[in-house]
Image (cartoon, rainbow, N blue to C red):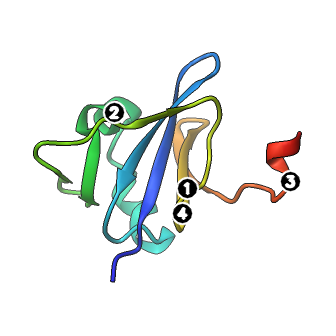
Amino acid sequence: MSTRAQIAIQTGPDEWTHVYVHFDGYPAHMLPALARWKPEDILAAREIRQVTAEALDCFSPPRDPRMLPRPMQEFAHLYMWIDCQWVNVVPKADAARV
């Protein structure tokens, strides 16, 4: 079974690109693995099987990432680039109504 995750990167004023990650999306693995990668690396990958410190194992061909007006957690974990570092974000339950 996979721990799926997504990485949300702001690409416009009201546009967030959500890159899918299929394996090992739990924070204990993802945060150290993401530390080496910048947002532009993740955006170039488009759809990722697994993130490691050594490589981004990408789907080939990749599906296009989802574009949404705000970061949204659709899988087990959501990661965002905040203050020049990757952060595991836990959205508030009522965030959609704000």
Q: Are marks 3 and 4 in contact (CB under 8 Å)?
A: no
Which residue in the structure is indicated by mark 3? 94
Could you classify mark 4 by the number of other residues whose Cα lies within 10 Å: few (under 14), some (14-19), or many (20 or more)?
Answer: many
Identity of the amino acid at label 4? His
Q: Which one is closest to the eye, mark 3 or mark 4?
A: 3
Query: Among all residues in the image, which is located at the extreme top?
Result: 13
Q: Are marks 2 and 1 in contact (CB under 8 Å)?
A: no
Q: Residue at x 18, y 56 (%)?
A: 54
Q: Is residue 40 above or below residue 56?
A: above
Q: CA distance from mark 3 to mark 1?
A: 16 Å
Identity of the amino acid at label 3? Asp
Which residue in the structure is indicated by mark 1? 78
Q: Which one is closest to the eye, mark 2 or mark 3?
A: 3
Q: CA distance from mark 2 to mark 4?
A: 18 Å
Determine the secondary structure under disc 1.
strand
Which residue in the structure is indicated by mark 4? 77
Give the quarter of the image for residue 44: top left
Q: On the rendered structure, is 10 left or right of 38?
A: right
Screen quadrant of the C terminus: top right
